Image: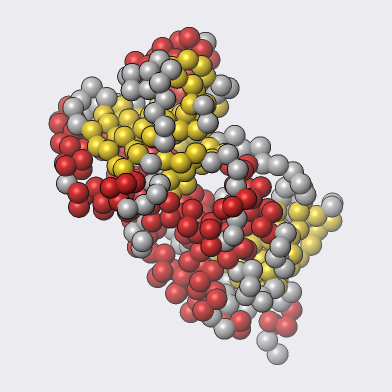
Amino acid sequence: MSRQTNVQHDIAIIGGGPVGAALALALRDSGLRICLLEARTPQTASQDARALALSYGSRLLLDRLKVWRHIQDISAIRTIHISQQKSFGRALLRAAELNVSELGYVLPYPALQSALDLGLQDTATHTLYGAQVTALQGDRDYASIYYTLDGATHEMQARIAVVADGGKLLAAQHPPEVRDYGQSALITHITCSAPVPHTAYERFTPQGPLALLPYKDGYELVWTAPHQAAQEMLLWDDATFLRTLQQQFGERVGDFLSAAKRSCFPLGLKRAPQQTPQPHIVLLGNAAQTLHPVAGQGFNLGLRDAWDLAQVILDAETSAVGSEKMLAAYRAQRRTDREAGIRFTDSLVRLFSNDMPVLSGARAAALTALDCLPYAKKFVAKRMMFGANG
């Protein structure tokens, strides 16, 4: 007799963050038995202070998931201004030129998480809050998930286990490919004297990219610098911080007036060799790949992971969920978009985050060409909004 008779769930989603929650919502009408294991306790708000840059394509997916209308505190991006410090050449991407209402959006991570949590309440997904997954094993017929809840140890079987919580579970057995860019991102909220409505800025400097994302009364700042320099910047007084930012960015938004509390996190490329490392197991989002924030692709790529996996599951017979045939179909569906997103982000970091004179002119020429060639501009904007499969 097949051991599938022991399977309690068709799908177990490990991690109830935005990517895991999005998968559960995409499958809400599937009739499948879905369990979501989330380490947070019920009604615990996310403590992640980072702002998210959502692409227009991600907004369309969140609309389909019926959660966009619940998201509060959204700022729209209709223009992206791209420039290089100490060099000519700049490019402008405008939503109006691309026949879309917006290029993207800026919102706090907790606002998105709250909207997704609210959406989950209207589904049949069985959510185990406070569940800490300790081990995961893919077998011939199903995946086994081991977790603790309320001080007790439990075991669960599912036709497919989806890891959407960062991927630490399988890191020892399947080490990810890691590339340390030697950079950290310092993030904070800033105000200025002449903000430009709905305009985001990406400015490349020798030490790394500097991004200003429009939000409320100012901008969410993502300032990239070598690890040691970023730690020192955390210790600067506000006057020194704002003065140095002004020198790096210029006066496109007037004078910088204030900075909120600053935080810092290291940057790198982390890539799982396989999105399906064991039978009946799939990695999604940051568990599959963690990207540099230079082009704002990380979460948007993860959301497309979740959507495409849901479509592959919906196309399969229930008995085939988690099978190698289904996993192969998912890998094929995601291959082009995933590889293109990783290459695009990695190439930007390598090309623009240095002070090599031989590349300065080429970078400036590339920005000028991007601004002058409608086809090139449309290609880049479409890639940023919808990914390689868009």
Residue 313: x and y, percent?
A: 54, 74
Toward the bottom, the furthest residue is 1
Which residue is located at x 19 percent, y 31 percent? Answer: 89
**Displayed quadrant of residue 12:** bottom right
The colour scheme is secondary structure
**Displayed quadrant of residue 31:** bottom right
Residue 212: x and y, percent?
A: 42, 30
Query: In this rendering, is residue 225 above or below 123?
Result: above
Which residue is located at x 60 percent, y 47 percent? Answer: 71
Left or right position of 121 against 54: right
Residue 266: x and y, percent?
A: 48, 34
Quarter holding the N terminus?
A: bottom right
Left or right position of 289 against 173: left
Query: In this rendering, is residue 237 above or below 121?
Result: above
Query: In this rendering, is residue 101 above or below 364?
Result: below
**Count of all numbered marks drawn on residues in the image:** 0
Instruction: Confirm whether residue 286 shows in the render.
Output: yes
Instruction: Confirm whether residue 248 shows in the render.
Output: no
Residue 66: x and y, percent?
A: 59, 60
Quarter holding the C terminus?
A: bottom left
Q: Compare residues 230 and 311 and report the one nearer the observer.
A: 311
Which residue is located at x 51 percent, y 79 percent? Answer: 315
Query: In this rendering, is residue 228 above or below 175?
Result: above
**Displayed quadrant of residue 155:** bottom right
Left or right position of 100 against 170: left
Q: Compare residues 273 and 336 and report the one nearer the observer.
A: 336
